[in-house]
Image: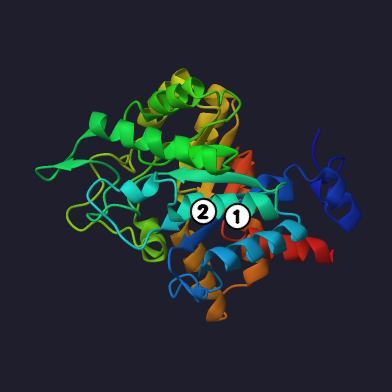
Amino acid sequence: MTFPNIRMRRLRENSRVRDLVRETKVDLDDLIMPMFVVEGLKKKEEISSMPGQFRFSIPELVDECMRIHDLGIKAVILFGIPAHKDEKGSGAWIEDGIIQKAMSQIKKSVPDLLLIGDVCLCEYTSHGHCGWIENGRLINDATLDLLSKTALSQVEAGADMVAPSDMMDGRVGAIRQILDENGHFHIPIMSYAAKYFSAFYGPFREAAESAPQFGDRSSYQMDPANVDEAVREVELDLAEGADIVMVKPALPYLDVVRTIKETFRVPTAAYNVSGEYSLIKAAAAKGWVDEKRIILETLTSIKRAGADMILTYFASDFATWKNKT
């Protein structure tokens, strides 16, 4: 049976009917807001390559967390930038580190906000790489101990979840082991399981002061051409104890999001990264695109591809629009 008996436009003519048959819906429950906190900062500063996004002092970060929680955002992921960096990135796990102090203060002020700690060393190392360097080469196994200590310190400071983003082999298992040994069986791990070596991270490196001082990260982040490798990475992370797996970036890798979701049927996240954010903001500032519509379409596409949750700098904008409807 076909036209004229079947008319697909019958379900499009009326906006209320369109709402009833809509297959994919983005809600506030799906969104995680990334945030940056800087040690020694006196006043929040806008990130020049990410208009509308800021680097916060701890008091201002707490205030912002209260604000976005009131908007209905239920989860944030934190990135810390220390005042001093060293070769090991020791600021990532010390008890009075910037991220530990920030988490403790947030938990006191906004206890219901789900607090996720990004577990990596690039913001804390003097060389800007994600692990221990010897003779210009990143040493995988020596890095695992540093990442494990970082994850444990974040949980002890108040993190409800940890998210290793370094792409070292074996880091999920190492983190799961140290958390369990210290009685934190209940803390989930959201693994950046398929994190690609991407040009879309540029603005983040300004925000987090994390650009490598030599070379690049192609020896540990994934080749953008590979999908089967992403499946293997996810499979290994799940075997090591990951509870949620992530694809990063989101938009150039929607096929990977779909593949991961259909293959494993586990909670799947996608990171709508800084470069994706900045491209939209730049085009909107020029008047080339309708900012609200393109943001909503972007988030819908990520959800439609199979992401159960989206890390996005647009979370606050989305929440504001949602509360006005």
204 vs 88, nearest the viewer? 88
Amino acid type of the residue tagged 1 in the rendering: Gln
Q: Are marks 2 and 1 in contact (CB under 8 Å)?
A: yes
Residue 318: name its quadrant: bottom right
* Quadrant that contains the C terminus: bottom right
Residue 314, horizontal then vertical, whole percent: 61, 61
Q: Which mark is residue 274?
A: none
199 vs 142, nearest the viewer? 142
Q: Residue at x 45, y 71 (%)?
A: 41
Residue 157, horizontal then vertical, whole percent: 54, 43
Local packing at callout 1 (Cα closer than 10 Å; few below 14, some 14-19, many 20+) is some
* Quadrant that contains the N terminus: top right
The Cα–Cα distance between marks 2 and 1, rounded to whole angstroms, is 6 Å
Local packing at callout 2 (Cα closer than 10 Å; few below 14, some 14-19, many 20+) is some
Q: Residue at x 30, y 45 (%)?
A: 130
Residue 265: name its quadrant: top right
Q: Is residue 251 visible?
A: no
Q: Is residue 10 left or right of residue 142?
A: right
Q: Is residue 166 left or right of residue 16?
A: left
Instruction: Name above or below for residue 240 compared with residue 159.
Output: above
Q: Label 1's element? A: helix
267 vs 169, nearest the viewer? 169
Q: Is residue 85 left or right of residue 191?
A: left
Residue annotated with mark 1: 105
Q: Residue at x 78, y 60 (%)?
A: 322
Amino acid type of the residue tagged 2 in the rendering: Lys
Q: Is residue 136 visible?
A: yes
Residue 283, horizontal then vertical, whole percent: 51, 74
Residue annotated with mark 2: 101
